[in-house]
Amino acid sequence: MDELWKALRSIHVATNPEASRRRTDQNHAMDLQLSQTADRWRRFYRVVDALEQGCGYQPFPKLDTLCKKAIACDEGQFLRILAEEPSMLDIVAVLLYVDRETMLHWIEAEMIFNVNVLFECLRRIFQGGPLPEQAENTAARGLLRLYGFSPERFQYFLQTSVLFREDCVGVIRAMLPRLTKEGWSRLSACITYTRMDNKHLLFWNDCTAGQNWQTIGFRAEPLFWAWRQALEKSAAQRAAWNSLYNEASNMLIGILLNQINTPRICEQVMEKITTESGTAMYRWYESSLRQKGVLLAALSRLEHLRLVWLKLGKDSLSPPPLSACGSWS
């Protein structure tokens, strides 16, 4: 038994830049050698993704046998030894020989206590295509656990491996009700607020279908403030827009319906925006382009609020399906 764990601890995968004649592969191999530190994990995973899309890995038949024996013997010990591994490339290589069902089991049983191991397990899981419903819930738990380990890696993983994939809708749908306010802040940084993308819009519509905004609306408020900041920044930079709506408009409607509980309050907010934007419009001496930016920001806020007002009039707390959608002051 000791020989088994000794063999597992002795694993070391080296890159050989000279082994390929392709300059791109040589550069990737050299980058892998240079990015084996905790503070360079983004660069490491960018290179790993590029390598996998290019020449891939050479086979390690002995490693396959070793991993199967070690997991069958004591998967807890296997994970503890893997967590001790300082080389992220070694973790990547070892987990090539672990099946997706086993990694999902580890996440469900909360057996993973190392951020590098968890990140790579999730990366492998999401590379495997659509998941059954129970596995989607487990994958969502894995994402939340990753956030607990590293909010930065959580955001990076969403942006690079999860968001806007049709086969990940169920995972995000399962994650949103359990996401903390700080987690929503990270999610908000992955969204574009000053233009409309139909594919992204449909993705978020599917993810938020059936969500209870009375329960999650308060925690989701960072999304609203990120939208407000994006409008202000866009106006200041005189950026061009292609719509008064954005990919997150239906989520913003849900948040606003949780904040504004009567049509009268909604009308008061709209009046305030109209007054403020009217004052800003008279500042013609700054720039006509800035004037236009201020006007577009105000129109976007008012249009979102108009839809909130309509929903309040119907006495409903369900965000509408979007072809246009909303937010407030």
Image: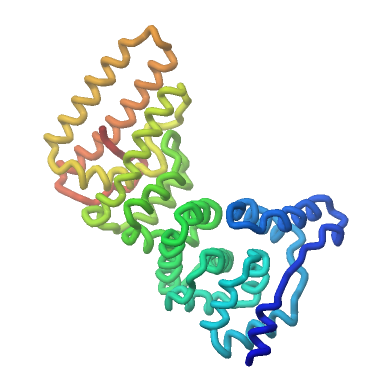
The residue sitting at 37% across, 39% down in the picture is: 226
Residue 124, compared with residue 287, is above or below; it is: below
Residue 7 horizontal/vertical position (percent): 69, 83
Residue 201 horizontal/vertical position (percent): 42, 46
The residue sitting at 77% across, 61% down in the picture is: 55
The residue sitting at 27% across, 30% down in the picture is: 302
Q: In the rendered view, how is the structure colored?
A: rainbow
Residue 162, compared with residue 102, is above or below; it is: above
Out of 198 and 183, give the one closest to the viewer: 183
Residue 143 horizontal/vertical position (percent): 45, 62
Would residue 157 appear left or right of 219 to someone viewing this image? Answer: right
Out of 320 and 164, give the one closest to the viewer: 164
The residue sitting at 70% across, 77% down in the picture is: 10
Would residue 85 appear left or right of 197 to someone viewing this image? Answer: right
**Quadrant position of the N terminus in the picture:** bottom right
Q: Is residue 43 visible?
A: yes
Out of 84 and 199, give the one closest to the viewer: 84
**Quadrant position of the C terminus in the picture:** top left
